[in-house]
Image: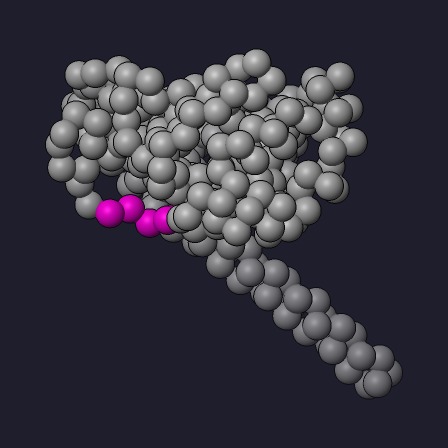
Amino acid sequence: MTGTIVVLLLVLALVAGGVYLAKQRSQARQRELEDAKSDARRWVERLGGSVLNLQGTNEPSKQAMADASERYTAAGSQLDQARTTTQAQQVTESAREGLYYVRAARTAMGLDPGPELPALSGQGRAGEVTETRDVDVEGHRYSASPDPSSRNSHYYPGGMVAGRPVPGGWYSEPWWKTALVAGAWGVGSFLLFDALFSGMDGSGYADGFQDAQAMGAGDFGGDMGGDMGNDMTPTDGGGDFGGGFGDWSGGGGDWGGGGGGDW
């Protein structure tokens, strides 16, 4: 009888210990989430102040502020829906990206761009546009430049888009947005990347287009067939968690169903 009581007490102690540890872990995760959301809220508010108080005076600055406003709307609408620390951190990333557009707008207007910002995910690998290039690809004219102009009025801060590095700089059009939405590049992107960036010092393609593809996890060779399929059957890249926040995640995943594994 005594032995049975001892066993029961041990089982109860183990159950109680397990419940206590689970509760402690849950509380720790909740604290981490609240800290991440607090940090995200601070960046969103900072972006909001810039969006509300700065207006563009020329085409490049107006376009950059429009992009900053889009990031502000996206980040703000998703903040209260964040259910994991990773999701809250992605809100922070989006708000910081918006602030890069604000800096670009200020630069285009000849103003002090303001304090430096933390690097965005993939920004270092993508590098920057360091020279002006005008190229014809499949009958269409594209241009890239380190400086804003009436020709190059679309800014991108640099980062990985659908697995490939897109250097930060000013472009004649936002050709990368299609890949942000679809989650994949079309077959013609091989020619565009090669023409615009191959051998450009300071970019992710300084050593040639093929080397950059290897750095980007073998993008072209590995998914050319998938790109062709995507061109023929468009896709939105998966769950959009309340309005396509993943469109602005710089090549990251969408907000997946239930706020889980698509990050």
Q: Nearer the viewer, residue 9 or 95?
A: 95
Q: Main secondary structure of the magenta part?
A: loop
The spot of residue 155 in percent (x, y) is 36, 28
Residue displayed at 82% across by 85% down: 2
Residue displayed at 40% across by 20% down: 172
Q: What colouring does the structure picture have?
A: one colour
Q: Is residue 109 above or below residue 93?
A: above
In which quadrant is the C terminus drawn? Answer: top right
Span colored in magenta: 116-120
> What is the number of callouts on the image?
0
Q: Nearer the viewer, residue 112 or 72?
A: 112
Say whether residue 64 is visible: yes
Residue displayed at 49% across by 38% down: 197
As for residue 69 lying within the magenta part, the answer is: no
Q: Quadrant of residue 236?
A: top right
The spot of residue 208 in percent (x, y) is 55, 47
